[in-house]
Structure formats: C-alpha cells, structure tokens
Amino acid sequence: MISAEDFLTSNPIRLPETGEPEPAAPAQDRDGGSTDPGNRLDNLEERGRTRFKRKGRRAYPVHQPKAGGFGASDMAAREVRPDADSVDACREAALTLLDAAARSSGTLAQRLSNKGFTGPTIEQVITRLTQLGLLDDRRYAQDLLRSCLHRTMGERGTLNEMTRKGLERSLSEEVIARAAEEGLFVDSAYELGRKVAKRTEGLDPEVRRRRLWGAGSRKGHNPSLLTQVANDLLADSDTDV
C-alpha cells in the first residue's frame, strides 16, 4: 500500500498565486447579450426595444400612454390634420358621428374639435346640419328626458345629465320645467319608491327610509318629494312595528 507521504510527493497540489478565483465570464443569451440583470438592462435600452426602469435587481418596462388614450393630455388627444379648414371633411366627420349615435350640438362640436377641425369650420357645419334637421337639440333633449325618467331620475339628476351631454342650460331647464308641470318627476319618484319598498320588504322601517333617501338622492329627486313618497309607501310598515 502506498503511503500518504509518497502520494503527495508524486501528486503535488498547485495553489493559485493570488488566492482569489478567476471571475467567470457572464453568460450570454441567444442574441449574444448578457443575462446579468444590469447588463441586460443596458443591452435592451441600446437595442431600442422599449424603455426600462430599475427596481432592485430587476428591470421593469415603462409603459407610455397612447396618444388620445387614458392618461394622455388634451393636446395629445387632438388630431393634427392638414384639412382642418375643410368644410367637406368636417361635414363627413360630423355625419359619421351622428350615424354612430345621436348627439347634441355641443357634444358634436367638441368631438369635431378633438378631430382637429377649426372653430369657424365646425360652426358652419353645425349650422347647416341644424337647418337640414339632422341636428336638433330640442328633440335630443326630449329623448334624453324620456331616458332619464325611465331610469327613475329626478329634476336635479336630469339637469346634470343634460348638461353632461352638451345641451344648453336654458334649453334643459325649459324641458325639465315642462315635465315637472306634467307631474312626470312625481311619477318617477313613486316608481323608485315602489322598487325600493319591494327590495327592502321585511327590513327595519328606518333602514327602508334610509335606502329610499339614498337612492332618491343619487338620482337627483327633491327631498320634500322623497319624504312624501316615504310616508305614502312605507307608512304601513312603520305602524305595524
């Protein structure tokens, strides 16, 4: 048997001179780039694929908002077009928008402005469409009123909806006042009250009243009208308790 001394003599151990291991070469991906997070971040930025930001040892892409999308500025949402003063182009754009959905003159003007048409051109097109009967704010207000009543909305809620849809306040108030004279908002409040009473049947009377007040307030009903509805539709349950 060979001794340990003879084995070491015939197989000497060679130690590195510096005592430190040589650094390993960084691994590379299929494109020849380094797989190291820091180097890979530089490689991606140099290739121009996308923008990245560093968070610890990881790299995350930086998403930029699209022009005209959520998070974009008003200037980015507005198109830049060479035919901004073209009445024909503006009229075609307006007819396309009206074919998609009924709109008020205010909403249509805003949409055309976002498409890059100038103010005088838009005004000329809207005036002509109104003369032809293709754009009628009063008819649109009446249609919107029926929609609001179907959703059991009140006077205040209907006015807010008409304003949001681009109708002039004077026209909206006129249409709403006539509907109020006909008692349409009273019918709407009682319809809402019947729905709330059916959903809350068997609950505590105070809870039922709060539910009615909450729903009526969100829909823009008059507080005194809501009190009347609550007294008429919820009085029986109150007396039974």
Image: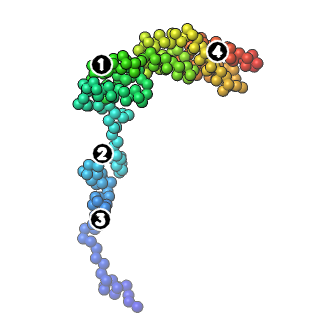
Pointer 2: residues within 10 angstroms few (<14), some, or many (20+)? some
Q: Amino acid at mark 3?
A: Ala
Q: Quadrant of residue 132?
A: top left
Relative side of 34 to 182, left or right:
left
Q: Quadrant of residue 3?
A: bottom left
Dot 4 or dot 2: first in sequence order is 2
- 46 lies above or below 1: above
- 58 lies above or below 32: above
Residue under label 1, please give it: 124
Dot 2 or dot 1: first in sequence order is 2
Per the image, label 1 sits on a secondary structure element best described as helix
Dot 3 or dot 4: first in sequence order is 3
Q: Residue at x 52, y 22 (%)?
A: 147
In the rendered structure, find residue 51 and report the number of the disc placed on it: 2
Per the image, label 4 sits on a secondary structure element best described as helix
Q: Residue furthest right?
A: 240
Which marked residue is nearer to the observer: mark 1 or mark 4?
1
Q: Amino acid at mark 1?
A: Gln
